[in-house]
Image: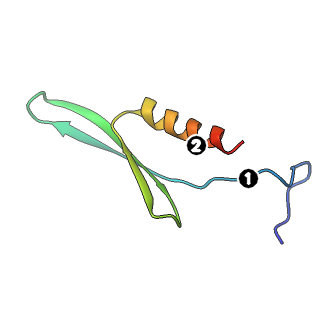
Amino acid sequence: MDAQPAGMDAQLRRKIYLLTCWQEQDHPANSVSWRFSLETPGSNTRALFTNLKDLMISIESELSADR
């Protein structure tokens, strides 16, 4: 049985993600963009994002669905 820190509700859940960030260069435009990969360990699911805003929307949506 896992011990809960003092004051933590036993109903609270936790999510673990593996976030990978890297830069890609667009050679014709000579610009650099960040890319993101969000993996959920144990479920073999991975989502790719081309911008930080979409990444955060995805995380917020998933966490809101678990309420």
| Residue sticking out furthest to the right | 7
Residue 59, picture quadrant: top right
Crowding at dot 1, Cα within 10 Å, few <14 / some 14-19 / many 20+, comes out as few
**Amino acid carrying mark 2 in the image:** Glu
Q: Is residue 59 above or below residue 1?
A: above
Q: Quadrant of the N terminus?
A: bottom right
Q: Is residue 4 above or below residue 20?
A: below
**Amino acid carrying mark 1 in the image:** Arg
Crowding at dot 2, Cα within 10 Å, few <14 / some 14-19 / many 20+, comes out as few
Q: Quadrant of the C terminus?
A: top right
In terms of depth relative to the viewer, which is nearer, 46 or 5? Answer: 46
Question: Residue 49: horizontal and vertical position, in percent?
Answer: 37, 40
In terms of depth relative to the viewer, which is nearer, 23 or 40? Answer: 40
- The residue that label 2 is drawn on is 62
In terms of depth relative to the viewer, which is nearer, 66 or 14? Answer: 66
Question: Residue 32: horizontal and vertical position, in percent?
Answer: 24, 33
Residue at position x 67%, y 45% in the image? 66
Q: Which mark is residue 54?
A: none
Mark closer to the chain start, 2 or 1: 1
| Residue sticking out furthest to the bottom | 1
Question: Residue 22: horizontal and vertical position, in percent?
Answer: 33, 45
Residue at position x 58%, y 43% in the image? 62
Q: Secondary structure at mark 1?
A: loop
Disc 2/disc 1 C-alpha distance (Å)? 13 Å
| Residue sticking out furthest to the left | 28
Q: Is 32 displayed left or right of 44 in the figure?
A: left
Residue 53, picture quadrant: top left
- The residue that label 1 is drawn on is 13
